[in-house]
Image (cartoon, helix red, strand yellow):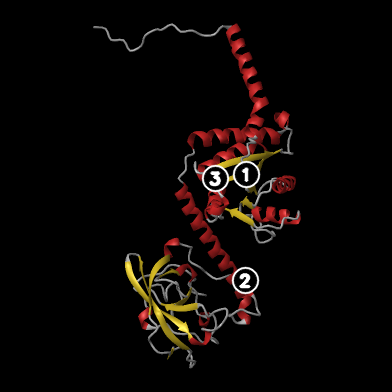
Amino acid sequence: MKFRFFIKKACWRPTILGVLLILVLLVILVRAWMGTVCQFLSMNEPVEAKTMVIEGWVEDYALKNALELYKRDHYKHLIITGLPLVHFEDYVMFPSTAAAAAAVVRKLGFKDSIYEAVIPKTVFIDRTYNTGVATRMIMSKHPDWGRSFNIYSVGVHSRRTHLMFERAFGSDYNIGIIADTDHSFDPEHWWHTSIGFRNVSNEFVAWIYVSAFFHPTYSDFKRKLEIGYYTDSINKERKEEDAFFADSAKSPLEKDSLKDFHGLSWYPIKYKYRVMAKFDLDTVNPVFEMATNTARKPEYRIYGHVIFKIHDTLCKLTVYQNINLKNDPQWGNYLFIPFRDKTNGFTTHAAGRYLDIEKPVSDSVIVDFNKAYNPYCAYADRWSCPLVPIENRLPVAIKAGVKEYK
């Protein structure tokens, strides 16, 4: 018996004339594609709507044209999408492209409300889709606006924007798209310039990818945006805190130590340390004098207790109200939570740290340990600070908030 592992098989191949014919057909197809792709990507299909969404990256001429259309067609609601400006952020005037575009629109005479759908700094990919999710989050807060809107975009970005927003909103919304002309290249001969070739080819490939492979889950992206917004807000507060400490007129630091101050030390922001706690109101206890590190005895009363889990450990903290501040217009609505945990004396201030929460309006409240701060006596001996009551010593390590100042 003879075994064979290979066999000879006849096959067809093009002749020289066949190759030439194929090349001619390819040239015709490519030339036809080049003549129509820009128009195809520059999708212009508006719907009947009273809400306009402007992509915040568009140039000033497009913002002017969008505003004229807004007035002509009697729109009632305006949303501007945008990305955070992270380059040179300490030196630029606007925090996002949406804020910058909104300023231009205001300068053009727009007087109505402007809603900004900006993605957080923690989001680096799928940014157009994320602006769609951010827009939906705004629309969901205004059900009276209806379920139709038009997006104002520019050029070849329009079709992909429309598809991304359709994926973000689902079939319950009727979404139109308006494409302004891109002035950066000639749409009829886009391949004559590098910017035209780059924009058209990139958008075409991106649109194919989104159409075939991008099928996101709205709830997952919404959750990431919410965490991102939270992270941005905490970082903003920390930057403001550093500025406060660096201000010689306000700083709790001794003036001779300011020259060595380069910012407070913080734990990384972790969303798990923003816990939902059960709140038990308890205001039957009398006013008492809270011990401090000095002879001062400020008056407090127990206002209630917060009960929560950290690292699967059930924890309880007593919440206090400062009697001297209860009628203060700025601080009267805040309650005081001094606490200690397993990090004290190692990475955090040995005497403990503080939290402030707003007075709960229900039987639950958010306790955010990412906002934990040091008593002023951690920075200078001249301060008088309440001591942490023994009942507010936690059996876990809270690796969140501010660290020990060195």
Secondary structure under the numbered disc 2 in the rendered image: helix
Name the residue carrying label 2.
243
Circle number at residue 177: none
Instruction: State the quadrant of the N terminus.
Output: top left
Secondary structure under the numbered disc 1 in the rendered image: strand
Q: Is residue 47 left or right of residue 6?
A: right
Give whichever of discs 1 and 2 has the lower sequence position: 1
Q: Is residue 379 visible?
A: yes
- Neighbourhood count class around disc 3 (C-alpha, 10 Å): few under 14, some 14–19, many 20 upward: many
Circle number at residue 151: 1
Name the residue carrying label 3.
129
Give whichever of discs 3 and 1 has the lower sequence position: 3
Which of discs 3 and 1 lies nearer the camera? The answer is 1
Name which residue type carries label 3.
Tyr
Evaluate if marks 3 and 2 touch, with contact meaning CB atoms under 8 Å apart: no
Secondary structure under the numbered disc 3 in the rendered image: helix
The residue sitting at the left extreme is 1
User: Distance of mark 1 from mark 2, alpha carbons?
Assistant: 39 Å
Looking at the picture, how far across and down is residue 244, in whole percent?
61, 74
Which of discs 1 and 2 lies nearer the camera? The answer is 1
